[in-house]
Image (cartoon, rainbow, N blue to C red):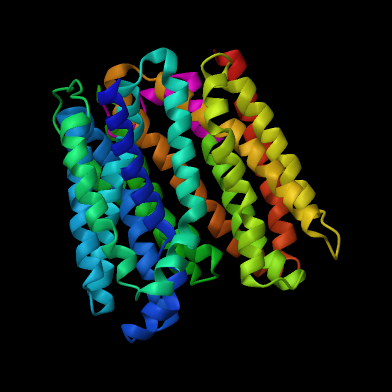
Amino acid sequence: MPKRLWAILTIGLGLTLAVLDGGIANVALPTIARDVHTSPANSIWVVNAYQLAVTVSLLPLSSLGEIYGYKRVYMGGLVLFTLASLASAISTSLPTLIIGRMLQGFGAAGLMSVNSALVRFIYPRRWLGRGVGLNATVGSIASALGPTVASGILSVAPWPWLFAVNVPLGVLGAAIAMRALPETPRSGARFDLVSAGLQAVTFGALLFGVSELGHGDSWARVVLELGAAAVCGFLLVTRQMSRTAPMLPVDLLRIPLFALSVASSISSFIAQAMGQVSMPFLFQHRFGLDQVMTGFLMTPWPLIVAVIAPFTGRLADRYPAGLLGGIGMAVMASGLFAMAMLPAHPGTFDIVWRMCLCGLGFGFFNTPNNRAMITSAPPMRTGGASGMQATARLLGQSTGAAMVALVFTAFPTEGPVAALFIAAGAAAVAACISSSRLAAN
């Protein structure tokens, strides 16, 4: 038990650092743009470089975890993340900062790609739902605290300290991980470099194409990028079909419970991203609220997820994920629909109870769904399942954000409300997919 607690601590610390740095720089982008003498549009690459690096490297790193051990990949990711944080902190130009952030993203991918796989070897099976629930709690709290932590640091120090604070925490986490994390079985397979390249181009081109489609960029460029993603994706899937331990876990997608869990995860995160991206515009543009009040009203969603995640983790050890996830997504769809139907002059309570409903529904879905993805895979393919879990989340979030931009372009005045209606529909689809797992068990 003492060693398990230290292992849980370092896993939680690494996850917190990876999730926080996904959005901690957002608050400081105007200041960063001014200090490095660049435009606001160019400064967004400080955020995009991190997200892109994470997305394209998750599955290759999860494959490396199966080959060389999850502990090694986690340790390598934590060390790289710490050094890249130092490089980002001392950057004095936009190109060097973007390189530092991209390296941070690769390090964060090392942490997130094997995070759930390590949980499977830290906890006994009868407690696995609790472990996944604790992970969800840590991730939700880190996500909720991101803007608050950034504002607190910026109130007493310049923006480089957003990255410098990671250095001592990363060193501490690496020291604990070295002694506490378990050694895991190794597959003995060889790393597929060609598949890694095809996977990077597939997901990178897909995310660029969807993002530019949402922002109304050149149709020729969008078609070229989406075409490249389709061709490379086809070649990737064809190549993976003949492999016993493929990097893109097409073998796991043959397992009905795993495939349905991935599909419901993507749909749920599309709904979550569309809701959380469009709500600030609804609060500020339609209701005339300021940024501080907007942040306060956005807090109940992740807060409720964090509070109930341990509870749903225990339920996930006893009840099917299809039942809990179906109920959760139905509740979330109701909350999003209720948000879209807000009156012209809502009170604080009118908004808060709807946000709580969204958080309650997502909390009931997320932990059981993550547990189902991990446990439905064979033990030797836990790394692939863990990487696919994180990839499904990022793919859903990126697609949802791009869809909001597309909806805002199509409906200039009613964009936030239209996006919330579509988000409710995506959550309803996730509820149907999740419920269908009851027949797959």
> Which quadrant, please, contains the C terminus?
top right
Q: Residue at x 24, y 50 (%)?
A: 170
Does 286 appear above or below 183?
below
Q: Residue at x 57, y 27 (%)?
A: 311
Q: Which residues are magenta?
A: 245-264
Q: Residue at x 23, y 39 (%)?
A: 74
Residue 139, horizontal then vertical, whole percent: 45, 43
Viewer-nearest residue: 249 or 122: 122
> Which quadrant, please, contains the N terminus?
top left
Tell me which secondary structure the magenta stretch mostly adopts.
helix
Q: Is residue 261 magenta?
A: yes
* Residue 431, quarter of picture: top right
Does 413 appear above or below 189?
below
* Residue 411, quarter of picture: bottom right
The reply, left or right, for residue 26 in relation to residue 405 is left
* Residue 305, quarter of picture: top right
Residue 273, horizontal then vertical, whole percent: 57, 52
The reply, left or right, for residue 238 in relation to residue 315 is left
